Each structure stands twice: as structure tokens, then as C-alpha cells.
Amino acid sequence: MVATGLRKTYGATPALESADFSIRPGEVVAVMGPSGSGKSTLLHCLAGIVQPDGGQVRYRHQEMSAMPDAERSALRRGEFGFVFQFGQLVPELTCLENVALPLRLNGVRRRPAQERAAQWLARLEVDTVAGKRPGEISGGQGQRVAVARALVTGPRLVFADEPTGALDSLNGERVMRLLAAAAKDSGAAVVLVTHEPRVAAYSDREVVVRDGRCRDLEQEHAA
Ligand code: ADP
Ligand code: ADP
């Protein structure tokens, strides 16, 4: 994915002024920068959740903003995975059902979906909470369940927005270690928004957003 000159303004607030970003298949890139600098807005533009006011996002030779909404949603469902600061698990479902849900929505039958979900819970070292609901588990466990849910469909690109932001450093590092390892195993690339250097240390490369600006030096070398 390659983004150039991204701009986004909310009312009178410029959130992004000129952001360049690139990520290669299988790469883990940390997006760093102070609070309010535009990191989340960059991630949302890259993921096609927010439509930028200007600039381009190219993914597999396609310009994302030129895609019809339906095609963009299909891309998100089929190729992207998401992890947020607070797991955003469905409270009424068990952890196993939460992880199986994206597969069920993609038409996978109940039994194989739950089998695959169980494998991912084990991979993230949370198989013991399979039958529990999100309200019955710790924050660190919840984030590991959320990572399992993001990876269960085999996405090519995972967007993680402060995935360890609500955790203490020990649990944060555990989540990050497992996320990075699981992504590497499955060949998924990860855009990781964080302001914690210890979390960014699990990335292959760091880019910095400051005052809505992001210069991606890799992109200059690639160009
Ligand atoms: P970061 O992730 O680095 O903390 P954000 O991208 O969340 O930065 O925010 C960048 C700027 O845009 C901030 O000034 C923020 O208040 C503003 N902003 C972000 N999202 C919205 C929104 N939905 N509506 C209005 N302003 C927003
Ligand atoms: P792990 O070391 O596997 O991350 P924890 O030490 O976080 O596990 O939690 C052990 C057990 O305590 C879990 O199985 C979970 O069900 C329960 N537990 C932990 N934190 C909470 C919480 N905030 N609310 C409810 N139950 C919790």
C-alpha cells in the first residue's frame, strides 16, 4: 500500500496536512507521534474508513478513493483486519464466538468457523477463555482475543490503533509480541499506531507523524 499527500480536515481542524506512507507485504510499520498529531486519521484514511480530502491511497494497483463504497467494504472485509485500543468485542458472545464471527459473516459454517477460531485463541495463548464472555476476562486477554479475531480471516493487512494503549506495560508487550509473531507467521502486514517506544520496538520500521505531516523515507528510496 502506498499513500501520498493525504489531507483531511475536520471542520476547521486540519487533522492531516500532507502524509506519505508505504507498507510492503508482510511488513510491520509503527506509526509514532504525539497525541493529536494525526496518527488515527492516517490509519482511518489508509483503511478506507475515512475518505481523505486530498491525496491518494493505492492498494494492489487500485486507487482506494476511486472505488465504489461497496467495493471498498468488500476489500475491508476480505483483506483487512482491525484491532482497536479497547477490544470492541461483542459482549453477548463468548470469546470463541467473537473470533468465529468474521468467518460466519464471510459464510463459513459454524463448526469449521469455531474450529478455526479455537486454533487462533490457542495461538494467542487465550484458549482458556474460549467459553467466557468479554466482561469476564482481563484487558490483556481481551486484546489477545481481539487480535485472534482480526487474524482469523487471513487478512493481508492489519490496522492496529493503539492495541496496547489500555494495558500495563507487561500485558502490552505480551499482546504486541503475539500480534507481531502471528502476523509474521501468516504473512500479514501490520500498520501499528502507538506512542509507546517499547511497543514500536516490535515493528520492522517506524514512521513519525507530526502536526499532520508524515514523511516516509522508505518511499523516497523506493521512488
Ligand atoms: P492522534 O491519533 O495522533 O492522536 P488524531 O488523528 O486522532 O490524532 O487527531 C488529529 C486531529 O484531528 C486532532 O486535533 C483531533 O482532535 C482531530 N480529529 C480527529 N478525529 C476527529 C473527528 N472525527 N472530528 C473532529 N476532529 C477530529
Ligand atoms: P493470563 O495470565 O492468562 O493473561 P490473567 O492473570 O489475566 O490471565 O487472568 C487469570 C484469570 O482471571 C482469567 O482466566 C480471567 O477469567 C480472570 N480475570 C482476570 N482479570 C479479570 C477481570 N478484570 N475481570 C474478570 N475476570 C478476570
Image (cartoon, rainbow, N blue to C red):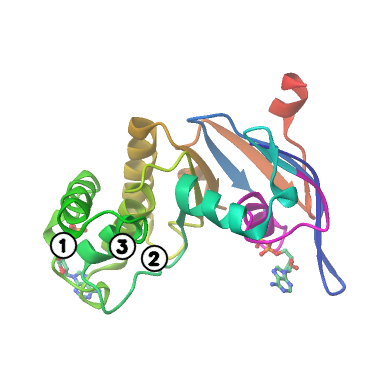
Q: Nearer the viewer, residue 176 or 122?
A: 122
Q: Classify 10 Å Cα crowding around label 3: few (below 14), some (14-19), many (20 and above).
A: many
Say which of marks 3 and 2 sits in front.
3
The answer to which quarter of the image holds residue 36 is bottom right
Q: In what quadrant of the picture does the C terminus appear?
A: top right
Nearer to the camera, 219 or 75: 75
Q: Is residue 152 left or right of residue 132?
A: right
Tell me which amino acid carries mark 1: Ala
- Residue at (56, 57) in percent of width and height: 73
Q: Closer to the N terminus: mark 1 or mark 2?
A: 2
Q: Which residue is mark 2?
A: 87
Q: Earlier in the sequence, mark 3 or mark 2?
A: 2
- Which range of residues does the magenta coloring cover? 35-56
Ligand 2 location (quadrant): bottom left
Q: Amino acid at mark 3?
A: Leu
Q: How many marks?
A: 3
User: Which residue is label 1 attached to?
Assistant: 130
Placement of 180 over or under 217, stated as above or below: below
The answer to whether residue 184 is left or right of residue 223 is: left
Q: Secondary structure at mark 2?
A: loop
**Numbered circle sitting on residue 85:** none
Res. 101 mark: 3
* Residue 222 falls in image quadrant: top right
Helix, strand or loop at label 3? It is: helix
Q: Residue at x 62, y 47 (%)?
A: 32
Q: Position of residue 48 (x, y in %)?
A: 64, 55
